[in-house]
Image: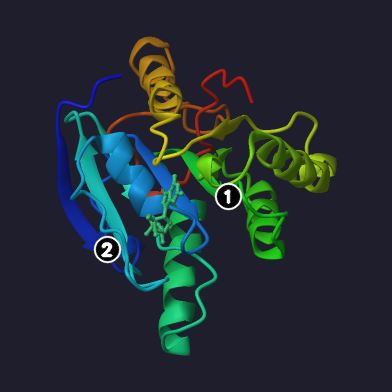
Amino acid sequence: MNISSAIFDRSAPDLDSCPDESLPEFAFIGRSNVGKSSLLNFLAGQNGLARVSPVPGFTRLINFFTMNKSWRLVDLPGYGFASGPKQDRTRFSGAVSDYLENRTNLCLVFALIDSGLAPQEIDLEFVEWLVRHAVPFVLVFTKTDKVTPAAVQANIAAFTARISAWFEKLPAIFTCSVQARQGRQELLGVIDEQMTAINTASIPAPAANESSPGLSLPAPARQNRKPRPDLHRPW
Ligand code: GDP
């Protein structure tokens, strides 16, 4: 996938301030300092897209970017930052959970994990939360240039060992390094696949009482929350 346009839409402090649900959304989230802003800029091919924050946790709003006029890249606030007023922390984690649970046009979450670290409790807790709330996600291990390939593999293996009991089939795992310019096409490829599935698959809007998965775009009002689409994901 080529990114021909990446346009900032808005920063939203809560779900009600988010844009309409007319475009499929792909959201990125991880612990502060995991390398999210760098990765988003790398994916978009624009250095100024997401700000690479000088202070962990500085970015606390949900940021929306319209990509190729056809989908949205969603930059979710990092979790686990320690500084900042407690009220803000609560508010923003509430906004994030609200978004993840209720946003009907959310197609997929990219959960970012630092590949240079042994499994961190906060990441494990977050993944467990995603599983519990049936949020579709893939894992992306970042900054693979920082440690040896063997250490990256060991950290990924340790992480998957901790979460494997929660799944019949593990979520898809990707690696990336902005420094080494690795992983961009693979991640964009996942989005491309989903977009193709949305555009080509005959995904009928469910009938009124039907609970079968379906994505109708423009998406319905949140009150009528529907199961998210099962786009024949390989994970
Ligand atoms: P965020 O807080 O998750 O948005 O993380 P940032 O993108 O602001 O990055 C945090 C720090 O990690 C910055 O100093 C980045 O330069 C650094 N960083 C980000 N990606 C990489 C990477 O792929 N490799 C290395 N070595 N450092 C990275």
Which image quarter: residue 164? top right
Q: Residue 73 at what x, y percent from top left?
A: 31, 42
The residue sitting at 51% across, 62% down in the picture is 97
Q: Residue 113: which disc?
A: 1
The chosen color scheme is rainbow
Front residue (pair 104, 156): 156
Q: Name the image quarter holding the C terminus.
A: top right
The residue identified by callout 2 is 12
- Label 1 and label 2: CA atoms lie apart by 24 Å
- Residue 108 seen in the current view: yes
Side of 7 where 173 appears, left or right? right
Q: Residue 57 at what x, y percent from top left?
A: 41, 71
The residue sitting at 38% across, 44% down in the picture is 39
- Residue 75 seen in the current view: no
Which image quarter: residue 227? top right
Q: Is residue 90 above or below residue 80?
A: below
